[in-house]
Image (cartoon, rainbow, N blue to C red):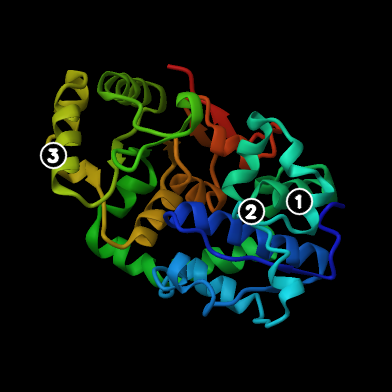
Amino acid sequence: MILDEEQYYISCRTDRYGSNAIPWIAAIYLSYISKRKLFHNTHQDKIRGSNRYKNTIIYNFLLENSETTEKRSIIRNDLLWNGSFDSNWMKKINIRGKSMEEQRYYHWGPYQIIKEIYNYKDEPFPDQFYNSGCFHKLKSKFHEKYDIMFRNNYDYNSICNSTLIHCRLDDTCKGEKGFVYQCFIGKQKLIKLINHCYKKFKCPVYLITNNDKSDKDFLIDIMKECNQDIINNQKQISNYIIGNDDVEFDIYIMMKCKNLIMSITTFPILSALLQDNTVYYTDDHFLLKTVLCKKKTDRFKFLEF
């Protein structure tokens, strides 16, 4: 084991919720299966993320499953690589000596954690996490907070038996030499995907994005260009476009659908980890490869269209 320490420390990142929450969940699960303590200091991460996410389910789940520490030896051995120093495990793997392609996996955060998890059972992290005690505790917290809200604000039965496509429309990210970390798949490709899903899964198709009027209007216009049978059966198109200011409400809605189609970003992976059904991806998904430790799993399937 590379992360062979008596205890672990996990910090926050400066970017958005999905990129923070997945490493947190992975660290909690690693602590759970290794029976080693996990530490996290809120006061040291206020600028980087803890202030932004202090009222979220997953961040509070991290606080419930970690302790604080003032020991620099523990804090400096952060499971996340912030690029400014190399902790014990980073020195063990000679992270600076790795190729740029290999370093990409470590830049985000959870890769080494997930590699450690894989070594416990020779199974990808999502397979081990599914139906574990951590899985059920975290899932129940979402259910307790959002189930009634979901039933009161949406067509519950329709969405639970639907295909839900996550659309990443903002905050696209490219790395060196144009390497794509997260992006929108494009208008024509999305129209083709909607048509394919409607025909393949034979159920309503919903689109979910951030709660921005211009983005939602954009998706309404896209739905209007889809096959006529979709337009005829989904007459009030705006009802099939979802997006809330509360991102964890959107996570819960994606958890409940029958067929979740992920975009190229971290955010829908959170819902995928808590899904009971098979989850689909449509493109070369570098961030998903990281979560899977570049291994195969039946919980995620490539959707060709």
Give the residue number, with chain letter if any, for mark 2: 81
Q: Residue at x 21, y 22 (%)?
A: 226
Residue 174 as seen in the image, left or right of residue 128? left
Q: Residues within 10 Å of mark 2 (few under 14, many from 20)?
A: many
Which of disc 1 and disc 2 is earlier in sequence?
A: 2
* Disc 2 secondary structure class: loop
In the displayed structure, 235 sits above or below 291; it is: above
In the displayed structure, 136 sits above or below 268; it is: below
C-alpha span from label 2 to label 1: 8 Å
Q: Are marks 2 and 1 in contact (CB under 8 Å)?
A: yes
Query: Which of label 3 and label 1 is nearer to you?
Result: 1
Tag shown at residue 18: none
Quadrant for the C terminus, please: top left
Query: Which of label 2 and label 3 is nearer to you?
Result: 2
Tag shown at residue 217: 3
Q: Quadrant of residue 208?
A: top left
Give the residue number, with chain letter if any, for mark 1: 90
Q: Residues within 10 Å of mark 3 (few under 14, many from 20)?
A: few
Q: Name the amino acid, label 1.
A: Met
